[in-house]
Amino acid sequence: MSTAGAAIFDVDGTLTDTNHLHVVAWWEAFRQAGHTVPMQDIHRAVGLGSGDLIERLLGADRDPGQDGAISSAHTVLYGTYSDRLPAFRRAGDLLRTLAGRDWRVVLATSASGAELAALRRAVDADEAIRDTASSDDVDRGKPAAEPVELACRLAGVTPEQAVFVGDTVWDMEAATRAGVRAVALLSGGIPRADLERAGADAVYRDVADLLEHLDDSPFGPGSG
């Protein structure tokens, strides 16, 4: 692949070990609003934007007047972890290595604002990150193609010149719809078969595993 390639990364569950923190925060936010939602169902929905996540878990016939309060409660609850969000081992090393190989690293995430800032602090590789496509920048989040398409534009590449790395079915579907090659990580807790069914071209245990096998991955010499 040419030096114009883009390495697009999801953050939660991909670069940072935060999916289960989101599950607990959403569970409590739903509980406060009078809803009992199984954590397993919440886990499967993590990675969607807040509005889509709430609709998926409560249904289209819910009282949408509660959505704002539920989303705000999740933000506040999750925010209590902001000073100690854990990055996965070697997450920053992977981004720096790719940037050193002339990949244009862009984040594509449903996080925004203070939450995104806290995640970037956890990863600690800002010097390697060229740009970010956050939920504030798009009308429709993953699994729509828009976040990945925006990341390609920010990097100045065509979809064929990009590789997207994520951990959820929504990530794989968004990449596939955008015409971008998809790499899945198992670190978010989603089964390999589900990720492959959603469009993953390659699957790795986590960022450290991807870094260890980088030359044989879609980021390797001659890939693309």
Image: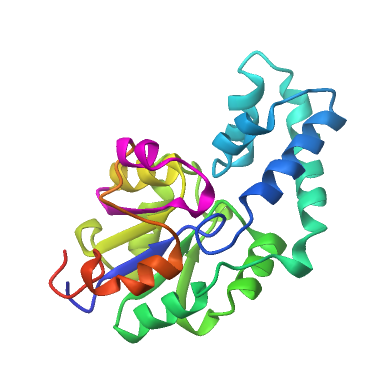
Q: Position of residue 132 (x, y in %)?
A: 49, 66
Query: Relative to 160, does residue 124 appear above or below in the rendering?
Result: below
Q: Kindly tell me whether residue 106 is visible in this rendering.
A: no
Question: Can you say which quadrant of the picture contains the N terminus?
Answer: bottom left
Q: Is residue 124 left or right of residue 170?
A: right
Q: Nearer the viewer, residue 158 or 29?
A: 29
Query: Relative to 172, does residue 208 appear above or below in the rendering?
Result: below
Question: Can you say which quadrant of the picture contains the C terminus?
Answer: bottom left
Q: Is 162 inside the magenta-drawn segment?
A: no
Q: Position of residue 192 (x, y in %)?
A: 38, 43
Q: Quadrant of residue 65?
A: top right
Q: Residue at x 35, y 73 (%)?
A: 212
Q: Is residue 163 left or right of residue 17?
A: left
Q: Which residues are magenta?
A: 179-197
Q: Residue at x 60, y 59 (%)?
A: 17
Q: Is 189 inside the magenta-drawn segment?
A: yes
Q: Residue at x 17, y 75 (%)?
A: 221
Q: Nearer the viewer, residue 43 or 179?
A: 43
Q: Position of residue 134 (x, y in %)?
A: 54, 57
Query: Relative to 89, does residue 224 appear above or below in the rendering?
Result: above
Count the labels in the image. 0
Q: Quadrant of residue 35?
A: top right
Q: Residue at x 78, y 27 (%)?
A: 66
Q: Kindly tell me whether residue 14 is visible in this rendering.
A: yes
Residue at far top of view: 61
